[in-house]
Amino acid sequence: MSAQIDYNQLIPNNVNLASDRRLLRALESWHPKFINWWKDYGPDAYQEKEVYLRTAVSVDKKGWAHFGPVKMPDYRWGIFLADSNIEEKRIGFGDHKGEKVWTDVPGEYRGPLRRLIVTQGDTEPASVEQQRVLAATAPSLIDMRNLFQVNVEEARHLWAMVYLLMAHFGRDGREEAEQLLERRSGDPDKPRILGAFNEQTPDWLSFYMFTYFTDRDGKYQLASLAESAFDPLARTCQFMLTEEAHHMYVGETGVARIIQKACDVMNEYKTDDVRRHGAIDLPTLQKYVNFHFSVSEDLFGAELSTNAANYFTQGLKGRYQEQFIKDDHSLKDEPYEITTFANNMIKKEEVPALNSINERLRDDYIKDCQRGVNRWNKLIKDAGIDFEITLPHRAFHRQIGFFAKANVSPEGVTMTEEDWFKNSLSWLPSEQDHEYVKSLMIQVTEPGKFASWIAPPRIGINNQAIDFEYVRF
Ligand SMILES: [Fe+2]
Ligand SMILES: [Fe+2]
């Protein structure tokens, strides 16, 4: 079967696939396995429906994507590297700062580079698996389409990482590519690599929180890898960021529309009890924020990390927007202030910047998360309602780093474990909250109609109307 497919045609690319027989053969043998994975663990049902999807077709900033109806298994998962001026491009940080960027993997960095690529690659199919059953409860056609859009693009990100593994890591790379299709989100025997990617995404409130908070971790990881001295990795990640922006947009606007609906109901019925009218109350939404923010913070790793320091020194993974940071970019003697926990006290401490690369990236991430929260709060304020959504303290509900053993409230107050658990039902979604949210999850498929708990978006996709048939039934 696969021998009849012209893979150079099937896989849109700007990496000159046609001229690389060895790579083409490797992709040819991986592609049917990928399709099997997609059909078995990608979106449940709807695979034969036409979905109005965006497909990456080039890296031209003005016209990189094509929009049109496509059945998901026919989606053209392409391979794109952002443009690079390879002659002039120099390494921006670490021990190799100022040297030419690498087009091949240096032998001594094979292991760590492979680990970085596999860890990033593993998150991509994981999120598709986590979101597998959501279409059955989509609140509208446009939301269902957005889910599928995120899913096909995460799968393309898997392709992007598999391309790097196959093009640059030989047999090891081909084996890793197979394993990326064999681990499963939430499977105790062969789990995905990172904790948050083994959690369920059981409902659409969780989906929007995930795309706002957890995809944003992806943005910061990709941005750090986009600084890499290994130029193919840098350019691949650079281009992935273009798609990632849309995922976070889906999350931010999704949450915004839930907030809007809650506010509209509060004003219309002059009540705080919006559950009676099938909306999601703001205190419940706050609990979901507390959960998803804290779980996503853990993805950045421990505050102090020699691994992260080594990646930096070796030039494999930089910091967020490295070129805008005003220091020597080698961090031999630079301090950085972090928040630590000792003797049941949270305090600030100055540590070597080189060891606190993870924490610095988490700081950038938290600032970015806050910006969207501010926009959500403006909606609430504009509706004349007295409520403010806040990000919990960074020490709240953490599993990794200094705060893993700490019992800290969302306001940043330390307490006994007993007190923490007593209060946790008011901080994190309870069983009843989950049940309530679940009870709202009823599929709506009539174009232009929306479930009771979410307002329509302000605009459609790619200038189409809100009531456009984004998924053809
Ligand atoms: Fe991704
Ligand atoms: Fe994403």
Image (spheres, rainbow, N blue to C red):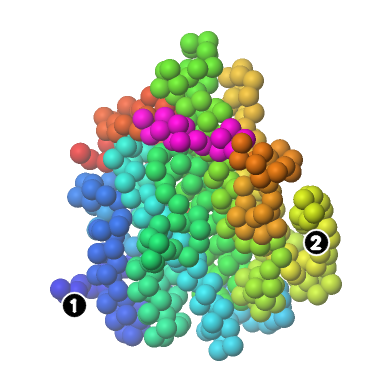
Considering the whole magenta stretch, tell me its main secondary structure.
helix
- Is disc 2 surrounded by few (<14), some (14 to 19) or many (20+) residues within 10 Å? some
Kindly tell me whether residue 271 is visible in this rendering.
yes
- Residue at the image point whose x is 48% and y is 12% from the top: 268
Say which residue label 2 marks: 336
- Residue 435 part of the magenta segment: yes
For marks 2 and 1, give the one nearer the viewer: 2
Query: What segment carries the magenta color?
Result: 423-439
Say which quadrant the C terminus sits in: top left
Is 100 drawn above or below residue 93 in the view shown? below
Is 130 drawn above or below residue 4 in the view shown? above
What is the three-letter code of the residue carrying label 1? Ala
> Quick one: 36 or 101, which is closer to the camera?
36
| x and y percentages locating residue 149 in the rendered image | 37, 49
Mark 2–mark 1 distance (CA, rounded to whole Å): 55 Å
Q: Which mark is residue 3?
A: 1
Is 314 drawn above or below residue 383 in the view shown? below
In the rendered structure, are the residues bearing label 2 and label 1 in contact, judged by CB atoms less than 8 Å apart?
A: no
- Residue at the image point whose x is 79% and y is 50% from the top: 345
- Residue 86 part of the magenta segment: no
- Residue at the image point whose x is 40% and y is 22% from the top: 278
Say which quadrant the N terminus sits in: bottom left
Is 207 drawn above or below residue 122 in the view shown? above
Q: Residue furthest bottom?
A: 107
Q: Earlier in the sequence, mark 2 or mark 1?
A: 1
| x and y percentages locating residue 357 in the rendered image | 70, 65
What is the three-letter code of the residue carrying label 2? Tyr
Count of numbered labels shown in the rendering: 2
Q: Is mark 2 within 8 Å of ligand 1?
A: no
